[in-house]
Image (cartoon, rainbow, N blue to C red):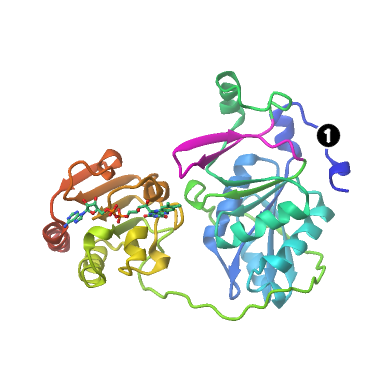
Amino acid sequence: QLRSARPTVIPHYTALARLLSTLAILEQREGKLNMSSLAAVTAAQKLGGSITAFVAGSGIKGVAEEAGKAKGIEKVIYVENEAYDRGLAENFAPLLVENIKKNEFTHILAGHSAFGKNLMPRVAALLDTQMVSDITEIKSEDSMALHIVTHSSIDKANPLSPAFVRPIYAGNAILTVQSSDPIKIITVRGTAFSGTALEGGSAELIEGVDPKVECPTTWVSEDLAKSDRPDLATASRVVSGGRGLKSKEEFDRLMPPLADSLGAAIGASRAAVDSGFADNSLQVGQTGKNVAPQLYLCAGISGAIQHLAGMKDSKVIAAINKDADAPIFQVADVGLVGDLFEKVPELTEKLKKA
Ligand code: FAD
């Protein structure tokens, strides 16, 4: 049904941008807007065209009002129903599809978070369309012109529709893709589209349609790691420990004081997590969190590609490793070859005095 309702192909990107109608899915927890989900709005702003935000849950009008302050958002669709509080994809996906159909959005954006990764493939399946996941860039009109000349992989049948850049093979290759589907379902990498500020806007609030689909999944409980430290995914400084720390005792002895001296979040390699040195929520990398802080300081991490996939966009990378040939030094801006059991306490002391 939706395929038969395809919009006509727009021949020019500027014209296309004017006709884009983008829905940015925002996340909330216990009535509070999840600020990192605003990355979807930032990406929508780069696309151009009109932007509508979407929120659902209980007591949601306050969240909708808050979201409506973001510059560039014209409307916020909200659905008041506690069934959507936990963001279960099984009933959230049909809810979204109903609202997408009603409003004929052309681009649907959500963060590449646990919620977005669970939800958006279901939305794509229900709409019989492909999804484009984990985008890090949207090609602008100018860069598209350049790109078409230099890359033959761009869809020649539809050369001037927006193109999306996304990492593949754990970030070892960067793909530029276009979608000829009438509705584009996209998740955006939060570290590549920093959240928009909640000021300068006054969006219209609209009550959305609620299909009230019965959810086959029951939410039982959650066990969230609580920490007074900055959130790993959004921290401006991260210190990270790997297998080189040898044990949980050493990880706990060396990494928290180093993090405290910098006001940093703590991360870990998968080997450190699998060995039980650090909590799973601290894992950085392909199968962990993506981070892009101002400073990423790591100790006892070799620099496997799967780890680099989650941190190589950091502005400054500093590494401590006793092996001068460790691959981490190929991406590090600052490297210290030495025994971390000496260097980390020494550095911590110096930072405390600085
Ligand atoms: P190692 O590779 O064992 O490196 C330890 C380093 O510590 C070495 O370089 C060593 O020289 C150094 N060292 C040892 N002792 C000292 C000392 N005293 N002083 C200084 N340096 C010392 N990994 C991730 O991190 N994140 C992921 O998300 C992830 N996803 C994966 C997904 C898949 C599908 C697969 C197959 C793998 C994934 N991995 C991931 C695992 C990855 O391949 C590596 O095994 C892992 O990153 C290695 O962690 P490490 O660097 O801590 O350990």
Q: What residue appears at the point 55 percent right and 58 percent down from the top-left corner? A: 113
Name which quarter of the figure residue 346 lies in. Answer: bottom left
State yes or no: residue 164 in magenta: yes
Task: Tell me the quarter of the picture where residue 216 sits.
Answer: bottom right
Q: Is residue 265 visible?
A: no
Q: Residue at x 17, y 43 (%)?
A: 324
42 up-or-down from 234: above or below: above
- Quarter of the image with the C terminus is bottom left
The residue at which mark 1 appears reads as: 8
- Give the side of residue 131 with respect to residue 181, left or right: left
Q: Nearer the viewer, residue 195 or 92?
A: 92
Q: Position of residue 41 (x, y in %)?
A: 61, 51
The answer to whether residue 94 is magenta is: no
Quadrant location of ligand 1? bottom left
Q: Position of residue 175 (x, y in %)?
A: 54, 35
**Residue for point 80% across, 72% down:** 212
Query: In this rendering, does residue 176 appear at all?
Result: yes
Beta carbon at label 1 within 8 Å of ligand 1: no
Q: Quadrant of residue 242?
A: bottom left
Magenta span of residues: 161-181
